[in-house]
Amino acid sequence: MANTTSAKKATRKIAARTEVNKSRRTRVRGFIRKVEEAIASGDQKAASEALRAAQPELMRAATKGVMHANTVSRKISRLSARVKAVSA
């Protein structure tokens, strides 16, 4: 347990930041799930629109430090390839 005032404040800040990061991560997963579902349904137009909506959210997660930038890049790249494959 924290003893000093600054340590107690740091604990409160960590808890608040954790909540924000959890909600951001959940939001990103929701966007990815929508793309996955559109790909599974075989609807190329819906899949590309879902991907277009998901990209800024993924990049925002990388900018805010919720996810690593390389992880986000990899996910976008793989989703893009799968969306492109749906049209073929």
Image (cartoon, rainbow, N blue to C red):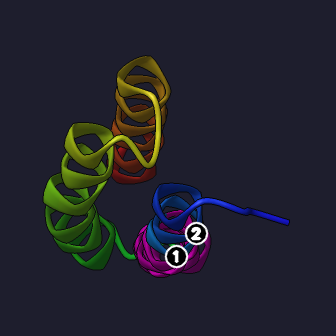
Q: Can you give x and y, in whole percent of width and height, for residue 77 in the image?
A: 37, 27
In front: 34, or 2? 2
Residue under the point 43% across and 68% down:
28
21 up-or-down from 75: above or below: below
Amino acid, disc 1: Arg
| Crowd tier of the residue under label 2, counting other residues whose Cα lies within 10 Å: few below 14, some 14–19, many 20 or above | few
User: In the rendered view of the protein, which quadrant contains the C terminus?
Assistant: top left
Q: Main secondary structure of the magenta part?
A: helix
Please tell me the numbered disc located at residue 8.
2
Q: Is 28 within the magenta?
A: yes
Numbered range of the magenta stretch: 14-41
Q: Secondary structure at mark 1?
A: helix
Mark 2 or mark 1, which is nearer to you? 2
In front: 86, or 55? 55
Q: Can you give x and y, in whole percent of width and height, for residue 10 in the image?
A: 49, 59
In front: 34, or 30? 30
Tell me the quarter of the picture where residue 44 sits.
bottom left
| Crowd tier of the residue under label 1, counting other residues whose Cα lies within 10 Å: few below 14, some 14–19, many 20 or above | few
Q: Can you give x and y, in whole percent of width and height, for residue 5 in the image?
A: 50, 66
45 up-or-down from 7: above or below: below
18 displayed left or right of 81: right
Circles 2 and 1 in contact, beta carbons < 8 Å: yes
